[in-house]
Amino acid sequence: MNGIKQISIFFLLITSTTLFGIYCSTKSDPAGPRVKASFDAELAKLRQIVEGELRPALAAKNEAALKKSFLHARSQYKQVEYYMEYFFPTTAVLINGAPIDEIELGENLVEQPTGFQVMEELIYEAPNAENRQLLANEINKMKLNLARVARYNAQYEITDEQIFDAMRLEVFRITSLGITGFDTPTALQSLPEAAAALNGIKGVLSLYGAEEGLSARIDIAISVLHQAPDFNALNRLDFITKHLQLISADIDQLRRKLQISPVSGSSAMSDDAIGLFQKDALDVKRFVGNHTEYPTEEKIALGKLLFNSKVLSNAGNRSCASCHHESRAFTDGLRTASGMDERDKSKSIALLRNTPTLLYAGFQRGFFYDLKAGSLEDQALDVVHHKQEMDGSLKDAASRINRDSVWTAAFRKAYGTAAAKADPWKIQHALATYIRSLAPFSSRVDQYMRGDQQQLNEEEKRGFNLFMGKAKCGSCHFAPLFNGTQSPMFAKSEAEVLGVPGRPDTAKAVIDKDQGRYSLSPYPQYRYAFKTTTLRNVARTAPYMHNGVYKSLEEVLDFYNRGGGAGIGMSLENQTLSAEPLNLSKKEMQQIIAFLKALDD
C-alpha cells in the first residue's frame, strides 16, 4: 500500500511539474522581442521612405511626388506611433510635434519646432527657394532623429505589459487627437492616418494570437475610416462608441486572458482604464506631487469648509466662494472678477480677468489664465495673499484657526493626529484637495459615451461631430476634459493666442490690452497667450474669454468661425488659432452649442 501511495505521489508530482512547466513556458515566452523586431522593420521602412522617396522628390522639384511621398511617410509613421510615443516620447515630439516653439522657462531656452507638422506647412504652401531649403533641412533632421531611435531601440528591453499599455494609450490618442485634425491641419489626412495607426495595432495583436473577432473589429473600423468621403463626413460619435471603445475593451480582454498585468506608466490615466469617458478613467492622484498629497474624504471636507469661510481674509469679509459661486459652476457671472480697492477695502473694483470655473481644475498642469501657478496649492497661495482678491495671510489665518476648537478638530480629523494643527501648507493643500474633487463626469455626454444612447438627441450628436471634425474645436479642447490638457498623457496644459478683442465689435476690432503670459515671461510667442480652459459646464459660465468680452456662446462661435482675431481684421503674427474661416453655417453653430450644453453636469 505504501508503494502504491509513493507511486501515486510520484505521478502527481510529475503531472504538477509538467503543468507548471507548461504554464511557465507560456508566461516566459513573451511576444515583446517579436514586437520590437517588428518595430525595427517598420522603422526601417519609414527611414527608406524619407531617404528614398521624400528627399528625391524634393531634389526633382516634383510637387506631386513630394506630397505623395510625404503622405506615405506620415502613414508609415502612424503604423508605429503607438511604440514611438510610448518608448521615445521626447524624440516623438521632434518627429511629429506641434509646429510651435517650445520654451523652457527655467533654462531660458527656445526650441524651434521640427518634424512632420513643420514639413506639412512647408509642403502645402506655395514653393519658393527659402521654404524648399527649410524643407531640405527638415528632411535631414528627420533622418537623424529616426537613426537615433533605431540606435536606442537596439538597447531597449521591452515587456508585454508595456506593449499592451502602449496600444491602450494609442486607442485613446486616436479618439482624442487622431480623428480631429490635430496633427494634420492642412493636409487633413486624419482619417487615413488613424486607419494606419489601427493597422499598426492590429499587427502587434497578431503576435499575441488575437482571435479573429478582434482583428475583424479593427478591419471594420479601418474600413469605416476609408469609406468616409472626406474629413468632415465621418460620424465621429459613432466611430468612438461603436468601434474605438469596443476595440479598447477587446484589447483589455486579451491582456487579461494572457495574464498580462496592467502597468503603471507615465500617463495620468488609471492603469486599468479602457475608455476615455468611463467614470474613473483619470486618476487625480497623478496630478499631485506625492503620496502625502493624495485626496481623502476628510481633506475634501476640510477644504470645502475653508473654501466657503471668510477666515482666510484678514478683514474677514471675503472667501473663495465670494467669486466662485457653486450655482454658476464656480464662476461669478461678471465680465471680470470683482476685487477690493487697495486704498479703501470697502470699495469694489473690476479686476483684469474673468473668473474661470473651478470644475475639473484639478486635471490641469497650469493655473490662472497666464499659467503662472504650477499647482492648485500655489494657486491658493496666490489668491489668498493677493491684495485685491482676499488680502489675507495663510500664516495669520493658521493662527486664527488654531485658536478655534471647531477648526482644530477639523484639521485633526483631516491630518490624522492631535498635533496636526493648521499651518499654511495644510490650508493650501486642503483647498486644493477640495477643488480636485470638483469633477463629477456626470454630463449627458458622459452617460452617452458609457452606453446610455438615449442621452443625446440628433442635434447634439451632430454638434459633437462638428466639434471634433469640421469646426476643429477638439484639436485644442481635448476630449475628455475638453480643456487644453492633451490626452492621453495629460502632461502639459496648453495656452493659445486667439486674438481676443477688447470689445465685441467685429468692425475695427482692437486686440485686448491684456498681454497674457507675455506679462510674466516676455517671449514674443507668449504675447496675448492664455490658457485653454475647459468647456465642461460652459453653458453656465458666461461671459466668455479671459476678459469676458462675449456674453453668449453664439458670439464665441462667430468669433471662431471668422478665424479669430485675424479673421476680424487684426494682424497678429503669433496667432496660434488658424486664421482660416471655418465656414460653419448658423445651423451648424447652433448644433455645436447644443452639444456644449450637453456637457453640463
Image: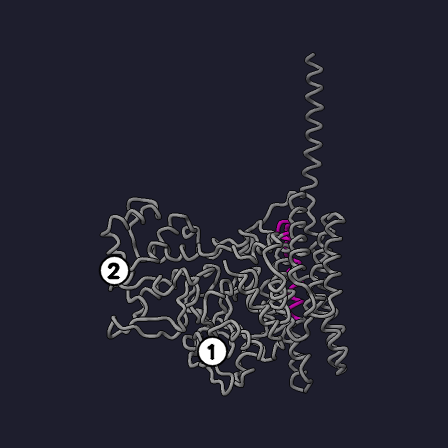
The x and y percentages for residue 601 are 50, 58
Q: Amino acid at mark 2?
A: Asp
Residue designated by label 1:
528
Residue 304 x/y as whole percent = 36, 54
Front residue (pair 369, 365): 369
Horizontal relation, residue 339 to residue 244: left or right: left
Instruction: Describe the element under mark 1 as helix, strand or loop.
Output: loop
Residue 601 located left or right of residue 170: left
Q: Position of residue 357 (x, y in %)?
A: 44, 64
Residue 150 numbered mark, or none: none
Whether the residues at callouts 2 and 1 have beta carbons within 8 Å, the answer is no
Give above or below for 113 relative to 207.
Answer: below
Is residue 163 in the magenta section? yes
Residue under the image location 45 percent in, 59 percent down = 362
Q: Is 112 drawn above or below residue 85 in the view shown?
A: below
Residue at x 44%, y 73% (from the top left corner): 546
Q: Secondary structure at mark 2?
A: helix
Residue 410, image x, y percentages: 31, 48
Stretch in magenta: 144-164
Q: Viewer-proximal residue, 195 or 143? A: 195
Q: Residues within 10 Å of mark 1 (few under 14, many from 20)?
A: many
Q: Gap in Å between the C-alphas at discs 2 and 1? A: 36 Å
Task: Bin the neighbour count of mark 2 within 10 Å (Cα to Cα): few under 14, some 14-19, many 20 and up.
Answer: some
Task: Judge whether residue 372 is colored magenta.
Answer: no
Toward the top, the furthest residue is 1
Residue for badge 2: 396
